[in-house]
Image (cartoon, coloured by chain):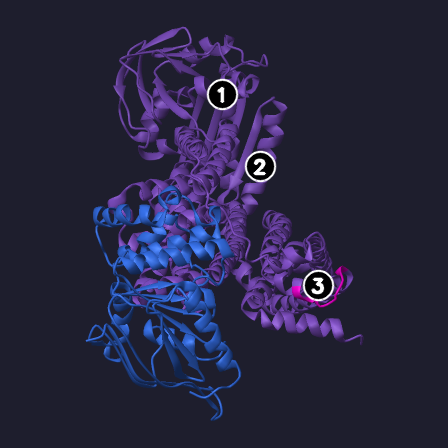
Chain colours: A blue, B purple
Amino acid sequence: MSLLEVTGLKKIYKARLGGTSVEALKNVNFSVEKGEYVAIMGESGSGKTTLLNILAALDRATEGTVLLDGMNLSTIKDSAIAMFRRDNLGYVFQEFNLLDTFTVEDNIYLPLVLAGRRHADMKARLDKLAPALGITEILKKYPYEISGGQKQRAAVARALITDPKIVLADEPTGALDSKSSDELLALFKQINQLGQTVLMVTHSTKAASNASRVLFIKDGVIFHQIYKGNCTDQQMYQKISDTLNLLAQGGEQ
Amino acid sequence: MKIGFYPKMAVSGMRKNGRLYLPYIIACILMVAVFYIMHLLGYSKMLENFAGAGTARDMLKLGTNIMAIFGTIFLFYTQSTLIKGRLKEFGLYSVLGMNRKNLGKIIFFESLITGTISIACGLLIGIGLSKLAELGFRKMIGLDSSYKFVISMESVFFTVGVYGFIFFLIFLNAVRQVRFSRTINLINSDKAGEKPPKANWFIGILGLVLLACGYVLALKIEQPLSALLVFFAAVILVIIGTYLVLIAGSVLLCRILQKNKKYYYKTNHFVSVSSMAYRMKRNGAGLASICILLTMILVMLSSTSALYVNKEESLNNKYPRQINISAGNDGYSDSYGKEIEKVTEVINKKTEENGAKITNSYIYTTCSVTGYFENGKLRLDIDPVKMFEDNPLGNITTFDYDKIVQVNFFDLDDYNRLTGNNETLSSGEILAGIEGKLQFGNELIIGDETFKVAKRIDTKQGDFKHTMNNLVVTTLVVVVDDFGEVTSRYNRYKDATGDTMLVWEWHYAFDTELDENKQKDLNDLLRNYIRDELYQQKFYAVRCESRVEERTDFVETFGGLFFLGILLSIIFLVSCVLIIYYKQISEGFEDQSRFGIMQKVGMTRENIKKSINSQMLTVFLIPIVVACMHLAAVLPIIHKLLKLFGHDNMPLLLICAGVCALICGIFYAVIYKLTSNAYYEIVS
């Protein structure tokens, strides 16, 4: 069984007044195997953020099911959803979303503290994680004292520390310069190679070319997908560009 | 651009920020209304028609000035918070092509609108409420109600003038804030990241030390009058200490809590402790101000209400009989007694001629000296007051105010008569009693004389307790058999100014069966006679006071004080509440994104609610808890000061303080609920 199974996903936004409604997701079907590194690409308004929000249980689908490790997201009670997110998902945001009231260390601990873990336990996990992410030096600093790349690495640490089933990343390189972007992508690849399942939403071809599989979403449906197979990053980059060109020209599936 | 453009911009801007502007305008209206009422009562002819309204009106006049100053400070503070929230909007206007002058016009119209609404509504409400306030005031100081409706043009003009000026100052301040910032800073003003404060051990501990010093000084004071300077020092220490402790000490506390891993990394503590640490530096000053305001309210309300509630008892304490006569002179002389005997006879005769029978009378003479008690000996060769004045600061630490002691000598006959006892003494023996704290053995040395204490006596027996009235100094009662002989030995002591130290006093007080008006008449008659007679004989402090007359004065003074206390408390309380409200609301907007992130990371709604509640509770509780501590520390001094007004009722004072704290607490709890709901709505 796949780790993540999405079937017949539909999301309709209704305007509060009047009957106008927008169909953000029409019919999305795909699955992600354990240990995969999947990128979802699409233009603004294609529905990729909506999709990610539903996967992260931040939003509810109008129709369809999302199964994570056999659990149906739509059957989880509202009161339990935050807990579910905390225990099963790691989320990396475009804008880092680190809290300026906490040190980097405390920011990383946050989900564990919310889960009520013991401090010794948290520290053991961080000690293992910090060297791999290269953040040992900045743990005691506050977010305002560190660079964007460092912030994003801290955010990745926060996503990983709960040992989540899947890491969801929303445009993780969007707010970074190219050097930091490269470092972060290398980091994602590295954690994926350690067995972590990653699902990334992006419109950067370069970011997507790191993934083992790329899904293209357009007008609320999965339009196409490419497997990396044995391609190099460069070859993958080329393949993605071609597909994007095709999409832009309004090509049919 | 049309003429109406700027007013329109101003109105729409204010409407959009209604959540901040509405309470601000309400506060302004309230301030204007209260100012008008105080001015009306204090300055208009409304209360002129009755005798002796002077005290109360003077207090109201003072209150008016306090109001003007406080109003300015408070409105400035609020306005600068308000404008901070709008800088971004102004930045946007500026990007869209408005120059500083245009922005100034918008601010001008905003100030104009706020000012006009506040002054107009405030005056209307003030005029409406002034009748109510007048009735309340009249009731409190015991006057009949009048049903005239007064609008004082003078007060209206004065209010408009003062508040017009305040709003003008506020306008200038707002313009200054906008003018001196660059467009880009305006736009980013709400995003400017802030460094989390570093814990400052030095300042935090200094604050605690200052606070402790202030408390110790305040609690050490035995005689508030001669130690007023010490008291002021204590007050200032406590105020500075409060600020330092709340600003730095609270950050320190948070940091210490954060060091304790077991405590800190708990779901309930994690978020609130860290955000408190982050906030406290900015909030500390605000909280400390609230705390000082609350302390003022509590001190004011509890002392004035205690005075007012207890006014009848205080009156009876200070004026034990319907007619109270006293006179004084320097040193001791046998001739005084003869003169007094003559005067007493005439008083008795005149009273009888007036158709009144003297009942319930008491009469006594006493002599007193004041010295410094050291090693079981009362030293008369140093003048403590002068010593203090010469070197006030040096003496705060070395000088023990408890040891300034007044000795009152009484004749055994007087003592036996007043208490109904039948004590006997042999030569060199005394009866000794003490009012205050003082340790002495079986031998007492006063100046160069040594006395053997035959018996300790209670100073509060029978009519003897009236001799102990209105004392603020530790007082030693010495009853001797040979009064004239003993006291004349002290005639040789001189004080620092060269006057005879020994003071002789005579007291005579009695009741009659006359009604109140006739008591007054009799009192006037006696007073004229006694003054003529005794002033001629070089006596001084000649008094003849009737309780009836003094009652009016008491009721007016205490009623006026209480009324003023209530009015000022309302103002202060409203300001406190508004300060808190603004703080929380503006923080709510800042926290919006923070709580959003935490929700995404896995914080449940329940966690959020809990965290908000604990945060709010701390912010609300700190000032009132600290204020109650301050109140507790200052109560002993209040008690001693109230003794000057003849108020010696500690239980009542405690009850009043408790009730006031409770009322403030309830009021506070309501605001807490409202504010935390508003806050929760913003962040979720």
Q: CA distance from mark 2 to mark 1?
A: 20 Å
Which chain letter matches label 1? B
Q: Nearer the viewer, residue A8 or B155?
A: A8
Q: Earlier in the sequence, mark 3 or mark 1?
A: 3
Q: Tell me whether marks 2 and 1 sit on the same chain.
A: yes
User: Marks 1 and 3: in contact by CB < 8 Å?
Assistant: no
In which quadrant is the N terminus of chain A drawn?
A: bottom left
In the image, B421: left or right of B297? left
Q: Residue at x 60, y 50 (%)?
A: B70
Up the image or down, B521 lies above or below B613; here it is: above
Q: Residue at x 46, y 36 (%)?
A: B241
Q: CA distance from mark 3 to mark 2?
A: 66 Å
Q: Nearer the viewer, mark 3 or mark 2?
A: 3
Return the residue at label 1: B504
In the image, B118: left or right of B287? right
Up the image or down, A145 lies above or below A161; here it is: above
Up the image or down, B121 lies above or below A149; here it is: below
Q: Nearer the viewer, residue B241 or B143?
A: B241
Q: Which mark is residue B107?
A: 3
- What amino acid is found at the position of numbered circle 3 in the picture? Ile
Q: Read off the magenta span.
A: B92-100
Q: Nearer the viewer, residue B153 or A68?
A: A68
